[in-house]
Amino acid sequence: MKFSHSVRALAWSSQLPLAMAFACGIATAQETTPGNSLQSLLAYARQHNPEFAAMRHDAEAVSQRIEPAGALPDPMLRIELENINNYSVDMNGTASSTSPSILPARVGETKYSVIQAIPFWGKRDLKREVAEADAEFANSGAAKTWSDLAAKIKAAYAQYYYVAGNIALTSELLDLMTQLEAVARSRYAGGLALQQDVIRAQIDQTGMRGELIGLNNEKRQLQARLNALLARKATAPLAEPQALRPLPLPAALDYSALEPRVLERNPQLQGDNARLRGADKSRELTYRNRYPDFAVGVTPRQMGNRVESWNLMLEMNIPLQQGSRRAQEREAEAMLSAAQARQQATANQLLADLSENLAGIEAARQMEQLIKASYLPQAEAGFQSALAAYENGRADFATLLDAQRQIRKARQDTLKAQTEARIRLAEIERLVGEEL
């Protein structure tokens, strides 16, 4: 029967009908609109997302603190005008003075002191290393922001693809149900079927139209979510998703291969490592504060219009407040211990998340393979058998509808497994800190 062949060609092609993006005639303007591929979304977000831009600017600002941290403080210039009223006593004991003056040549004596503070040996290097650790922490924060943002975009794009695919599948099945209704009407008109068959077909169509309303609403919500991640207007248009990116080979998703990459490259763990290095250097600096800092100076002494003499000066602070220093040292030790514990906790959680997501992606991959290799062919064969039996009056319409629902479920489960695998992959890449 011609209808049987048309139904087989229409409904059960081996590829998921996201060709709807092409069937709908995507406009040329859509080619420049993000959304048709994951890479287009990531490229747009990297360029326009304000949170990521703010973190990069913060990291750049913190990195500029490294040079000042290890530099000597600015020297100080001190000018002392002594005996500004030129008070003097002559040999007869007679005191005399003139009007006060602040001109160096008209006072009793002027001292010019240039003083340079010099921290104890090693303190400047430690301060620079602490600043470098802070810069590494800020850079890891920017990298973590991007990693989290990219993971959200990848997950949202997979869901966007799932909903768009579900809309296409439901629309396709709605067309099929319209044709099945026509078959039921024809058989009912010939007295070969019940009116209830026609009504059931109409009820299923109404249900699918209701599902399409819900799916289109969900699609708009996902578009708004993606636009928010891209820093675009919530109602800005997005292109139809065309395809999911391929999964890496199973060998690339091996725990033993990914574990060292997580420990080495995960931005959050890199941040904790930088914080740990900073805490360690801060502790060393705190212990180095047991020793005094110095200041050296040179002082030319002016009398009248001539420099009569030169003085040298050495100054140092006396670290007598040992109680406060011991408290600072205990604080530094506690901060170091906290950083070590935080780093270990982060590493443990990351590896646990890695194992969980690897198990999830493997389960999704196996489910997709099972559906394609077994469930879907069985459902298709069951539908073709039910269709042929109904056309020949050997099966009722309920059997045909049930077979149609089974194949629809198989297609939806395939979509769901593909989406789940990509969401898991996005999370794994977030943990690894790079794309696989």
Image (cartoon, rainbow, N blue to C red):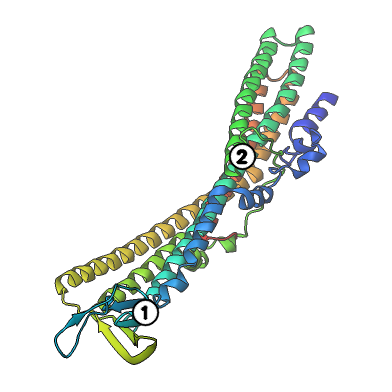
Which of 239/15 is in front? 239
At horizontal 55% and vertical 57% (from top left) the residue drawn is 429
Q: Where is residue 210 in the image (x, y as percent from the top left)?
A: 62, 20
Tag count: 2
Crowding near the residue tagged with mark 2, few <14, some 14–19, many ≥20 C-alpha atoms within 10 Å: many
Query: Considering the numbered disc 1 on the image, is that residue within a helix, a strand or a loop?
Result: helix
Q: From where the camera sits, is residue 263 visible?
A: no
At horizontal 68% and vertical 42% (from top left) the residue drawn is 35
Q: From where the camera sits, is residue 169 visible?
A: yes
Report the mark closest to the observer, 1 or 2.
1
Q: As displayed, is residue 287 above or below residue 23?
A: below
The residue to which callout 2 is attached is 227
Q: As displayed, is residue 410 above or below residue 356?
A: above
Q: Position of residue 43 (x, y in %)?
A: 66, 52
Q: Which amino acid does label 1 sit on?
A: Pro
Q: Where is residue 160 in the image (x, y as percent from the top left)?
A: 62, 39
At horizontal 45% and vertical 59% (from top left) the residue drawn is 268
The furthest residue to the right: 2
Q: Position of 431 compared to 79: left or right?
A: right
Picture quadrant where residue 213 is located: top right
At horizontal 58% and vertical 63% (from top left) the residue drawn is 252
Q: Which of marks 1 and 2 is nearer the N terminus?
A: 1
Which of 315/393 is in front? 315
Per the model, the C-alpha gap separating discs 1 and 2 is 70 Å
Label of residue 62 in the image: none
Quadrant of the frame with the C terminus: bottom right
Q: Position of 63 compared to 368: left or right?
A: left
Label of residue 104 in the image: 1
Q: Position of residue 61 (x, y in %)?
A: 50, 62
Which of 50/77 is in front? 77
Q: Position of 107 compared to 48: left or right?
A: left
Query: Considering the numbered disc 2 on the image, is that residue within a helix, a strand or a loop?
Result: helix
